[in-house]
Image (cartoon, rainbow, N blue to C red):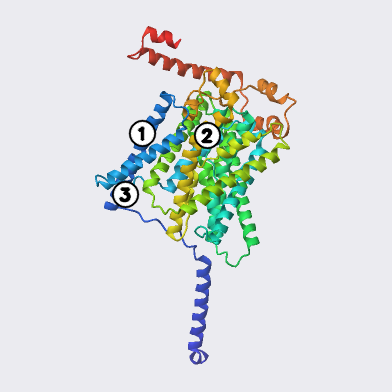
Amino acid sequence: MAEEEFPNTTHSGFNVTLHTTLLVTTKLVLPTPAKPMLPVQTGEQAQQEEQSSGMTIFFSLLVLAICIILVHLLIRYKLHFLPESVAVVSLGILMGAVIKLIEFKKLANWKEEEMFRPNMFFLLLLPPIIFESGYSLHKGNFFQNIGSITLFAVFGTAISAFVVGGGIYFLGQADVISKLNMTDSFAFGSLISAVDPVATIAIFNALHVDPVLNMLVFGESILNDAVSIVLTNTAEGLTRKNMSDVSGWQTFLQALGYFLKMFFGSAALGTLTGLISALVLKHIDLRKTPSLEFGMMIIFAYLPYGLAEGISLSGIMAILFSGIVMSHYTHHNLSPVTQILMQQTLRTVAFLCETCVFAFLGLSIFSFPHKFEISFVIWCIVLVLFGRAVNIFPLSYLLNFFRDHKITPKMMFIMWFSGLRGAIPYALSLHLDLEPMEKRQLIGTTTIVIVLFTILLLGGSTMPLIRLMDIEDAKARRRNKKDVNLSKTEKMGNTVESEHLSELTEEEYEAHYIRRQDLKGFVWLDAKYLNPFFTRRLTQEDLHHGRIQMKTLTNKWYEEVRQGPSGSEDDEQELL
């Protein structure tokens, strides 16, 4: 009777209970939404994409081949006064003009192939350049001057970014130039503060300056690129967030926290990866199979970049510190064959990447849609030069209170004058997500003009400035019948750094480092504990095997040369 009186109530309660249970269960087991899959191109569309990519690869290789011939001609005819970067950029401008003429005559259309892709730059071209810079550092001078280098690279770059970004913002507010908001101004100030290490180190090598001072400039220029990229990413991160309800002080604290996380997190990741690679190659003996050993080094070289980018850190900062650590520890666990192979391969790949970047920088004058504003360009150049001066002169005077090697006013001026800009500011300007499109074109065009101004005008006039300000060294060079050489490729091709071929036994290492009384700070800690832990101390048998390996390769090459069609007794006597 009760069931007949309340049938609907019972079923209704059951339905409600079932609905609630299903709802809760669904909420509990509901998976997180998957990332949208990229569309897969098939059929005719995939074939067209493959043809386009093939033409892009062909065009890039063709440009590289022409640039290599140009660098060879510079070396052969001893045009050492002209930096290779200046020559390659000039060739790129000429090639861009020829391609534009061909397109105007409607003979061909290479507009897509000659466009510079920022993603290709950051994923393929920049990592080998940064890793090679860290790998080829003179570690002794670098670690002894790490405080001064960090001051120039971190605080100096931040000062330059704030000067340029703040100047652009306030000039825009005064209606002197086009208006940019605070975050966009700071992003532009950050990207334009990246100094080009390729041209800078060529100039200072030509000066024959003190090795410690050379390391200050070289170390600052390398770290400066990574810091500039992190600062630009910080500004971009603030742009993506809605900061309208946040005060200026809170914005500054958020930016500082983001920068510190990116800087120290990426540096720690790169350092950890380098130390792991040292332990792996110390305890897994691949010395008798150089191909496997070299393959493992290449994997560890690119590994920190991919990992850092995947967890939203700076891949460039990670790969820089990984290169420094791997060169300091991992490199000495390698066989002599792999040591030479690693050094020369990195130099070759870095040269190709640098050359490709500078050539496409010249091509960009004709391939990039421009918006030119003369007042904006002039004021930006003034702010860039002023920001570099505010960076170099006060910090140099401050460092002189704590340094034995003083930085003279003449050297300060040359350091300021040689603060050339390179491809990193240009790639960063294309990578910025600015709206509207006119603002992005204005930033891109201004960056190209500043880069070309510093490379062609300042870089081209640095050699006369050196001769004018360095009279005594110029007389010494004339007496020695030596010419000033700005060719980085020729210098690298003629040397194999002894630091990268050191193999010490336990007794030799102890005599060289442990018993020395002049080691202090990190250098003492490294020699006493870190180096013995992360590097292999070789036995006499290991050294003997390494020498036999090198001798076997040399004898094999010599036999092939002697048995070749051009081999003769006269050639053999010349080789001997």
Seen at 38% across and 39% down, the residue is 92
Q: How packed is label 3: few (under 14 Cα within 10 Å), some, or many (20 or more)? A: few
Q: How packed is label 1: few (under 14 Cα within 10 Å), some, or many (20 or more)? A: some
SS assignment at label 1: helix
Front residue (pair 174, 537): 174
Q: Is residue 217 left or right of residue 398?
A: left
Question: Of tags 3 and 1, which is closer to the observer?
Answer: 1
Seen at 63% across and 25% down, the residue is 537
**Residue that mark 1 sits on:** 66
Q: Which mark is residue 462?
A: 2
Of the numbered discs 3 and 1, the one sitting upstream in the chain is: 3
Q: Quadrant of residue 256?
A: bottom right
SS assignment at label 3: helix
Q: Is residue 521 left or right of residue 347?
A: right
**Contact, mark 2 vs mark 3 (Cβ under 8 Å):** no
Front residue (pair 97, 18): 97
